[in-house]
Amino acid sequence: MYDDNNVFAKILRGEIPCKKVFEDTHILAFDDINPQAPVHTLVIPKGKYVSMKDFAEKASDAEIAALTRAVGKVAEIKGLNESGYRILANAGVDAHQEVPHLHIHIFGGRALGPMLVRK
Ligand code: AMP
């Protein structure tokens, strides 16, 4: 069930500002408010999708293509293609998803270390 009051829904409605990086018909990309790396940008579909499962099942082919292309565009806009970057999407409790609107994190601008914290 999609929560219309989540923070990214508010950004999409223009109720909360964001530092926009890229936008097209289906996608908005903006800088994370609490960056974990010198570059930390979020890429979100404009449609109401909670998670990748939701998106994969319900989004149109055009939306799915747009999300993939937008990730590539943002990496280019942020100048990450030479140095490299990491993309990540949290889903659900184990991944500690905080905002229940699908978002792809793009991290870069420094050596990012191993993929997961080892316990
Ligand atoms: P996740 O844990 O994958 O759900 O990540 C949610 C991300 O959204 C976190 O990295 C937050 O810093 C970020 N965030 C929360 N509120 C805002 C906001 N108003 N503008 C930009 N990023 C936000």
Image: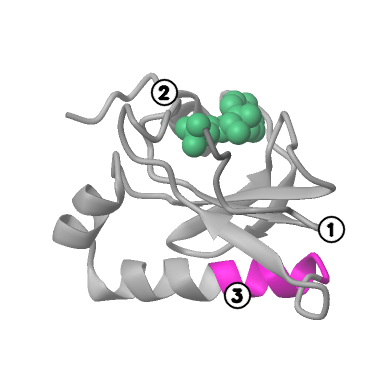
Q: Quadrant of ligand 1?
A: top right
Say what amino acid the circle numbered 3 marks. Answer: Gly
Circle 3 Cα neighbour tier, 10 Å, few/some/many (<14 / 14–19 / ≥20): some
Give me the disc on residue 109.
1
| Residue 115 image point, x, y percent | 58, 53
Tag of residue 72: 3
Q: Main secondary structure of the magenta part?
A: helix
Describe the element under mark 1 as helix, strand or loop: loop
Q: Nearer the viewer, residue 43 or 62?
A: 43
The answer to whether residue 19 is seen in the rendering is yes
Of all residues, the one furthest to the top in this rendering is: 5
Magenta span includes 13:
no
Precedes in sequence: disc 2 or disc 1: 2
Helix, strand or loop at disc 2? loop
Q: Which residues are magenta?
A: 71-79
The residues tagged by marks 2 and 3 sit, at their Cα atoms, a distance apart of 26 Å
Q: Which residue is mark 2?
A: 6
Name the kind of residue labelled 1 in the image.
Gly
Residue 111 x %, y %:
81, 58
Instruction: Give the color scheme: rainbow, by chain, secondary structure or one colour.
Output: one colour
Badge nearest the viewer, 2 or 3: 3
Of residue 71 and residue 29, the one placed in the foreground of this image is 71
**Could you classify mark 2 by the number of other residues whose Cα lies within 10 Å: few (under 14), some (14-19), or many (20 or more)?**
few
Residue at point 38%, 76% (across, down):
65
As drawn, 48 above or below 81: above
- In this rendering, would 2 be left or right of 79? left
